[in-house]
């Protein structure tokens, strides 16, 4: 590898925490006090310190990180047209209608249902809103300004600034320019709307807060707020409050509404939440929390500040985290830049012309959703914290056979390791109930997946889980191994020993489950020799084929990875040496898949025949191509296995649902097929029409449930973004490859900074004409790796905190 090496630079780490989490120190300095602690419940917090000013974006950065539209969202189509804001727990969709600003507001912890720990006669857990439960809406907030009818408006524009977490709207009426801003502040735990004007105009109207479950809103004229509080049948308490204030005009309570008149500016502040607590022993409740009272306190505390101070506090919290990754995939044309975001999406599909700035913006929009939906609360499920009704499909739950895992594939890769904490904290909190229910019910005679040995140990999960330790649908035996695979991969990025210790009980419990579950069978290899191997008991390859197959490739691959990760973790932590040897022995006996002599594909079942749908949406047998990497295009993988995996991926096709296309893109990136990976990435930008698969106006990915009806499913947004990063950099501990699947559309020139690297590094790289012109590699705990670029390789050694810069690689 011919290159120029810049001297190694050393930065002393401030503590033992990986420096990817350094944004917390920046947030503290900026005054975002609540960012320093994990607050999984709606709780009181110390008032944040306030920054004196908000850091400004350069004009170029501002432009590339702004999405914009020329029409407001319809109140009848908020999930496709509303713009999202969120503070990690609260999520809202905003319509930005001049005469009737509507916010549809959710709370990640507002769940019906419960533990749901009884099996039905067919062995399934109940799976409905009355038993398993559902994520549901918290409130609707409307700011009505009757004389700002859209028919009287000129030069309407609304913008989502993903770098600052800010929605802005502007329009003109009779020569007056009216502006509004909407943001969800984590430090103040509130959603803020600020209305202003230039040219002598004013605002007159009402603010109305309504629950969505029949709650009664009350108002307080002295405190100038409206609020409600209630409880579900499961005992979960919740509440919300709103207040408004202005430096001019009149603001008062009128009945249950807040009315305002003659206001040159107006600030509206909303807060709300539940008494959910991530504690199985406390039945997931904090009895000390009165959500309605706390919501009132929070909105009144925030109302003691100016709107600009609230905005600066929010931006000082949001910006450092967003700024941990920057990307440039090339320059779009002037004609493309003139189009609004929805026009660009349509043009990209219609003209089939690369729009690299739009494609980079899609990645940054996905990062915006991650920051807005996954901080200090529950992780994101099927829709994250953005709903438009009380009954999301599949209850908006956590599917353990792809959804929750895919949601977090992007986090470490794209400079958002901190956002992964919600996933970790969820698994840790649920473990006591998952373990107890597994011990009691997994070997129930109705469970078709029960262990034929009669033994059971550790923990397992169902295909669907909720925040109360609850299970829905069928048992999912390999789900524990997949959840842990994601947990362990996060350690590979951060090299955080304290974190590894935290997840170790989950890791060991999953290993114990599989030690009890594996059964012995005899196989015959190609030479006719027989040998005994360990295989999965009766199981189902998600979500098709026979439900009583043994030795599924999906499970075998996941357990192979689980046992290897347990070896690494137990050795690093100095734990369970004897048990580690036992598991090592089991791992050497695990059956691993072969290629079917009939189809030429990697077998999904221990059968030469395909027993399911050829083009099925799931890529279950390719689980160790991605997200695992036992199968990879190098000398470590036998050619027949690599060819069989490639043939199976080809057979699955290039057309499916958004999340399935994202998974396919990631697999093709691993196989270094840049063209197929790119085609799948941009196919998810196809405009959704009447609920068809593709991107909606607000860039939410739409999953076509049935003809004419689509739903939002957020993992496609995150999976597609992960694929973009994977095309630019592949890593595993001890190995980094640059530009493994760079498509022609991005090859002319580009750069990306802040990419997470497994093994404990962060990479900044730039390229021109398809070759790396510069790489900066910084250690956040890693010490040694091999770097590959353009077919050449080089060994690199660094100490934590050190960085090295290389130029002209390959």
Image (cartoon, helix red, strand yellow):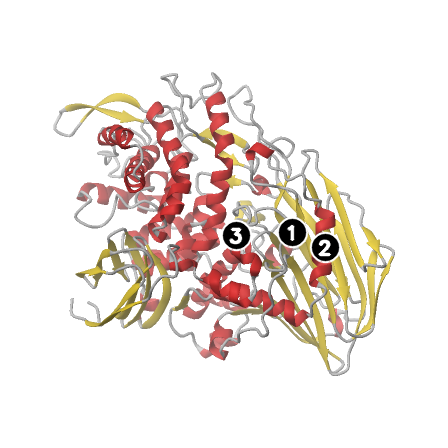
* Mark 1 or 2, nearer chain start: 1
Q: Secondary structure at mark 1?
A: loop
Examine the rendered structure and indicate whether residue 411 appears above or below residue 807: above
Disc 1 to disc 2: CB gap under 8 Å: yes
Percent position of residue 726, x then y: 34, 56
Horizontal placement of 663 versus 521: left or right? right
Pointer 1 local density, CA inside 10 Å: few below 14, some 14–19, many at least 20: some
Q: Secondary structure at mark 3?
A: loop
Q: In the image, which disc is placed on residue 297?
A: 2
Nearest the eye: 226 or 2: 226
Q: CA distance from mark 1 to mark 3?
A: 19 Å
| Quarter placement of the C terminus | bottom left
- Residue at screen point 55% across, 32% down: 470
Nearest the eye: 797 or 695: 797
Percent position of residue 62, x then y: 51, 74
Q: In the image, which disc is placed on residue 407?
A: none
Q: CA distance from mark 1 to mark 2?
A: 9 Å
- Residue at screen point 70% across, 60% down: 301
Residue picked out by circle 1: 44
Disc 1 to disc 3: CB gap under 8 Å: no
Residue picked out by circle 3: 374
Pointer 3 local density, CA inside 10 Å: few below 14, some 14–19, many at least 20: many
Q: Secondary structure at mark 2?
A: helix
- Residue at screen point 62% across, 63% down: 183
User: Based on the displayed image, in which of its 4 quarters is residue 242 positioned?
Assistant: bottom right
Horizontal placement of 176 versus 59: left or right? right
Q: CA distance from mark 2 to mark 3?
A: 24 Å
| Quarter placement of the N terminus | bottom left
């Amino acid at each position: 590898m011919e290159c120029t090496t810049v001297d190694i630079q050393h930065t002393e780490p401030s503590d033992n925490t990986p420096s990817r989490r350094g944004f917390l120190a920046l947030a503290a300095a900026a005054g975002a006090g609540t960012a320093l602690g994990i607050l999984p419940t709606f709780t009181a917090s110390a008032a944040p310190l306030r920054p004196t000013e908000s850091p400004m974006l350069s004009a170029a950065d501002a432009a590339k990180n702004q999405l914009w539209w020329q029409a407001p969202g319809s109140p009848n189509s908020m999930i496709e047209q509303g713009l999202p804001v969120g503070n990690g727990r609260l999520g809202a969709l905003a319509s930005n209608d001049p005469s009737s600003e509507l916010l549809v507001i959710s709370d990640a912890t507002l769940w019906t249902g419960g533990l749901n720990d009884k099996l039905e006669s067919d062995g399934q857990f109940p799976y409905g809103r009355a038993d398993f439960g559902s994520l549901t809406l918290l409130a609707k907030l409307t700011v009505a300004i009757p004389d700002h009818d859209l028919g009287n408006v000129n030069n309407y524009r609304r913008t989502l600034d993903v770098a600052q977490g800010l929605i802005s709207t502007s329009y003109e009426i009779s020569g007056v320019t009216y502006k509004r801003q909407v943001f969800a502040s984590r430090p103040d735990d509130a959603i803020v709307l600020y209305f202003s004007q230039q040219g002598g105009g004013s605002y007159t109207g009402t603010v109305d807060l309504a629950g969505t479950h029949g709650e009664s809103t009350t108002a307080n004229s002295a405190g100038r707020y409206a609020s409600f509080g209630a409880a579900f049948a499961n005992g979960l308490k919740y509440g919300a409050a709103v207040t408004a204030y202005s430096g001019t005009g009149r603001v008062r309570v009128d009945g249950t509404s807040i009315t305002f008149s003659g206001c040159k500016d107006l600030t509206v502040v909303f807060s709300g939440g539940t008494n959910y607590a991530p504690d199985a022993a406390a039945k997931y409740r904090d009895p000390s929390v009165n959500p309605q009272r706390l919501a009132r306190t929070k909105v009144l505390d925030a109302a003691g500040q100016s709107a600009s101070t609230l905005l600066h506090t929010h931006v000082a919290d949001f910006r450092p985290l967003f700024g941990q990754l920057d990307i440039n995939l090339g320059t779009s044309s002037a004609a493309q830049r003139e189009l609004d975001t929805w026009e660009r999406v349509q043009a990209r599909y219609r003209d089939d012309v690369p729009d690299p700035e739009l494609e980079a913006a899609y990645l940054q929009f996905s990062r915006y959703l991650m920051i807005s939906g996954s901080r200090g609360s529950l992780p994101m499920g099927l829709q994250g914290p953005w709903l438009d009704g009380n009954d999301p499909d599949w209850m908006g739950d956590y599917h353990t056979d792809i959804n929750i895992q895919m949601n977090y594939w992007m986090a470490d890769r794209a400079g958002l390791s901190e956002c992964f904490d919600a996933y970790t904290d969820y698994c840790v909190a649920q473990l006591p109930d998952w373990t107890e229910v597994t011990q009691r019910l997994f070997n129930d005679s109705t469970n078709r997946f029960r262990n034929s040995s009669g033994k059971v140990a550790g923990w397992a999960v169902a295909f669907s889980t909720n925040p109360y330790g609850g299970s829905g649908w069928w048992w999912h035996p390999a789900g524990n191994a997949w959840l842990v695979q994601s947990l362990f991969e996060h350690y590979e990025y951060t090299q955080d020993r304290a974190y590894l210790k935290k997840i170790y009980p989950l890791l060991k419990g999953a290993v114990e489950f599989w030690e009890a579950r594996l059964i012995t069978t005899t196989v015959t290899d190609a030479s006719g020799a027989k040998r005994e191997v360990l295989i999965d008991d009766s199981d189902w390859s998600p979500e098709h084929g026979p439900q009583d197959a043994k030795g599924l490739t999906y499970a075998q691959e996941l357990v192979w990875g689980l046992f290897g990760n347990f070896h690494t973790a137990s050795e690093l932590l100095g734990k369970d040496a004897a048990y580690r040897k036992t598991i090592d022995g089991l791992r050497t006996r695990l059956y691993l898949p072969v290629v079917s002599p009939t189809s030429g594909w990697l077998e999904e079942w221990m059968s030469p025949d395909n027993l399911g749908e050829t083009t099925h949406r799931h890529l279950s047998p390719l689980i160790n191509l991605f997200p695992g990497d036992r199968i990879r295009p190098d000398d470590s993988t036998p050619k027949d296995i690599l060819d069989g995996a490639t043939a199976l991926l080809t057979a699955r096709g290039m057309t499916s649902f958004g999340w399935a296309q994202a998974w396919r893109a990631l697999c093709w990136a691993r196989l270094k097929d840049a063209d197929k990976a790119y085609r799948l990435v941009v196919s998810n930008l196809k405009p959704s029409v009447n609920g068809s698969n593709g991107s909606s106006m607000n860039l939410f990915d739409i999953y076509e449930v049935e003809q004419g009806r689509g739903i939002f499913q957020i993992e496609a947004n995150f999976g597609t973004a992960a694929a973009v990063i994977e095309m630019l950099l592949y890593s595993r501990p001890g190995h980094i490859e640059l530009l493994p699947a760079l498509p022609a559309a991005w090859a002319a020139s580009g750069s990306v900074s802040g990419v997470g690297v497994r093994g404990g590094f962060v990479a900044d790289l730039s390229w021109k004409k398809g070759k790396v012109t510069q790489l900066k590699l910084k250690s956040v705990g890693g010490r040694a790796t091999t770097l590959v670029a353009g077919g050449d390789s080089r060994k690199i050694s660094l100490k934590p905190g050190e960085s090295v810069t290389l130029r002209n690689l390959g």
